[in-house]
Amino acid sequence: MKKVFALLSVLGIAVPYYYIFQFIQSNNGEWSTALFFEQISLNYGMSILNADLTIAASTFLIFLIYRLKVKAISNQQFIKYLASLFLVGFSLALPWYLYDNFDKG
């Protein structure tokens, strides 16, 4: 199972960044925050996905804070998962957490 979580962690980096590069390429090699947020909220289907991901990532963040508070993870681990959540996304943070904590009982 750890191999599956490791693969999902790699995919959690590769797939979102592939689409970020596609977005930049389609905009003449430039990043536009305004255009990004305009397109991400373009229709109700995208809004559903945005709401779902926001709630899931927020839940994971609250869970991490709880795990830190009860000393189930160290400050260093908390920072690692927090950085992965905000610098890459939930697609990396959750599989990486599961990889690190699988079979710990």
Image (cartoon, rainbow, N blue to C red):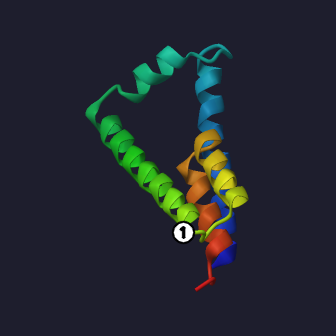
- Asked whether, in this view, residue 40 is left or right of residue 5, the answer is left
In the figure, 103 relative to 25: above or below?
A: below
Residue positioned 43% across, 49% down in the render:
58
Q: Amino acid at mark 1?
A: Val
**Above or below, comparing residue 20 to residue 78 in the picture:** above
Spot the residue most to the right. Answer: 76
Q: Residue at x 60, y 69 (%)?
A: 71
Residue designated by label 1? 70
Q: Residues within 10 Å of mark 1 (few under 14, many from 20)?
A: few
Percent x, y of residue 73: 63, 67
Foreground residue, 51 or 36? 51
Where's residue 48, x and y in %? Answer: 30, 42
Say whether residue 68 is left or right of residue 55. Answer: right
Q: Quadrant location of residue 88?
A: top right
Residue at left offset 65%, top offset 22% = 25
The quadrant of the image that shows the N terminus is bottom right
Residue shown at 54% from the left, 69% from the top? 70
Q: Quadrant of residue 49?
A: top left
Q: Is residue 93 visible?
A: yes
